[in-house]
Image (tube, rainbow, N blue to C red):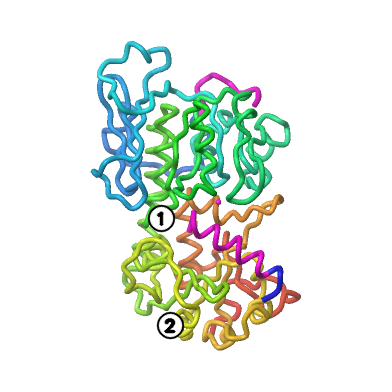
Amino acid sequence: MNRRSEKSGRILCLLIVILWSGCGTSSDPPSIGRAAEREPQGERPAATALNQCRIRYARGFDVSYRDGCKIVTVFEPGQAPGSKGAATFVLVPRGTRRSTPVVPTEGTVIEIPVRRVVLRSASHVPFFSMLGLTDRIVGIAQGKYVNDPEVSDLIRRGLIAEVGVGSGMTDQFDVERLFSLHPDLVLSWWTNNPAYAAHIKVQDAGLPVALLSDYEESTPLGRAEWVKFIAVFFDVEAEAERVFNDIERRYLAMAAKTKWVHHRPTVLYGNSYRGSWYIAGGKSYFANLVRDAGGEYVWADDNSTGSRPVNAETSLIRGRNADYWLTQNQNHCSLASIAAEDSRYKLFRSFQVGRVYSNNGKIGPGGGNDYYQGTTARPDLLLADMIAILHPELFPGHKLIWHLHLPPNLSDGAADTGAYRK
C-alpha cells in the first residue's frame, strides 16, 4: 500500500467514526421560501398548523411543546428514545427568558429564534440551505470543504468566518474567534472521544453548544429528519415539516418500485485498511439503503447498527462473489488504482465484471466529498443513485450524483452507469 493510500485510509477510518464530515447577519426572520423545489402536497398532520414538528424516524432526539417553550432532548447515541436524555434544551421566545413559566430545573435555556449560529461540520450546511437559513451562519470550521454554492460565496465574501484551528477530525475551535462572533448557538457533532471533542472548550467558555448525532441514525429518513432539530432553534418547524414530507414521499415512492423486483443483487461495501475492513452493520444506515434500493447487503445477517472492524480476509471471502462493490476510498478512481492497492481485489466477481462504484463522484473545489454533505439532507436522491446502480431499468437515464462507476483505467474516464454491466 503506497503513502497516498495510507493517508487516504487514515481519513477513511476517521470518517467512519462519524459517518457513515462574524459578520453582517440579518436579525430579520429567514426567507423560508428558498427551500428546494417541491411538488404539490396533499393534507399534512395538524402539527404544522401551530409551527410544530413531529419526530417519526429519527431516534437521536425528540421535541415537545409546553407552556410557551420547547423542550429539545438529545439522546446519547445508541440509546432508545424514552431513555434519560444526554442533553436537554429549553427554548423560550426571545426576551421572555426570565418570565417563561415551568422551565425545567435542568437544561440549557436558549432564546429563540437563534440569530447567529456557528457550525463545526460542513455536513450540516445542507439543512440550513433547505430551510433558507444560510444567512444565520456566522462561522464554520474548515469552511474550505463546504460545497454549498451560497455558503461558499458567503465564506469568500467574509460574511462567514473561519473558526477552526488544525485539520481533520482533530481540529479545534478558535474560542477567542467564537466570542468575537457573539453566537447564540454553536452546533457540533457528538463524540465521546476527547481527541475529537472540540466542543468541550466552547462549553467551558460558557457558550451554548448543541451536539448532533445524525450520523448515528440507522435509516436514511431518520438521518434526514434532523433538519427538524435545526428548525426548532429558528422557529421554522412548519417549513421543516414541508421539506421533510416532500423528501419522505419521494423516498417511499422510489422504494416501493423495488419491492417486487425479481432479482436482488448482492452488495459489498467499503475496503480494507491495514488488515481490517470496516463493515456497516446489517441494521445500519447503509444496509437499510441497500434494502430500499432492491439489493441484498452481504452483511445483512449482522445485528449491529453502526460500523465495526472485521478481519480483512473474512470480508474478502464474504464479498468475493458479490454482484456489486461500493468502495469508500476517495483515491479509488479506476479499477487499476484498486488493483494497485491490493491485488486480491482482482478476485472479486464485481471487479472482474466491472461493477465497482466509488462514492467520490461529487468533489467540491476545496476537496470536500459531497457524499458526506449532500446525501444527509437528500436521501431521496441518494436512493435514486442506488436504484440506478442496482436496477437501472427502473430509472433509465438517471445520471449518478454521488457515485462514480469506475473505469478499467483512469485514462478511460468515468464510465456511464452500466457500461460494464454483464
Say if residue 399 shows up in the picture: no
**Kind of residue at badge 1:** Pro
State yes or no: residue 29 in magenta.
yes
Query: Spatial distance from mark 1 to mark 2, Cα to Cα?
Result: 25 Å
Residue 320 x %, y %: 48, 85
Report the front residue among 36 and 282: 282
Residue at 65 percent across and 22 percent down: it is: 24
Residue 101 x %, y %: 27, 15
Can you say whether 90 is above or below 57 in the image? above
State yes or no: residue 209 in magenta.
no
Q: Quadrant of residue 281?
A: bottom left
Say if residue 253 shows up in the picture: yes
Under circle 2, the secondary element is helix
Under circle 1, the secondary element is helix
Residue at 53 percent across and 19 percent down: it is: 28
Checking the image for residue 318, the label placed there is 2
Question: In the rendered picture of this protein, how many numbered marks are placed on residues?
Answer: 2
Residue 143 x %, y %: 65, 42
Instruction: Specify the segment rendered in magenta.
Output: 5-31
* Contact between labelled residues 2 and 1, with CB atoms less than 8 Å apart: no
Residue at 38 percent across and 15 percent down: it is: 97
Residue 278 x %, y %: 48, 69
Q: Residues within 10 Å of mark 2 (few under 14, many from 20)?
A: few
List the residue tagged with mark 1: 220
Residue at 58 percent across and 50 percent down: it is: 169
Can you say whether 420 is above or below 69 in the image? below
**Kind of residue at badge 2:** Arg
Can you say whether 193 is above or below 395 in the image? above
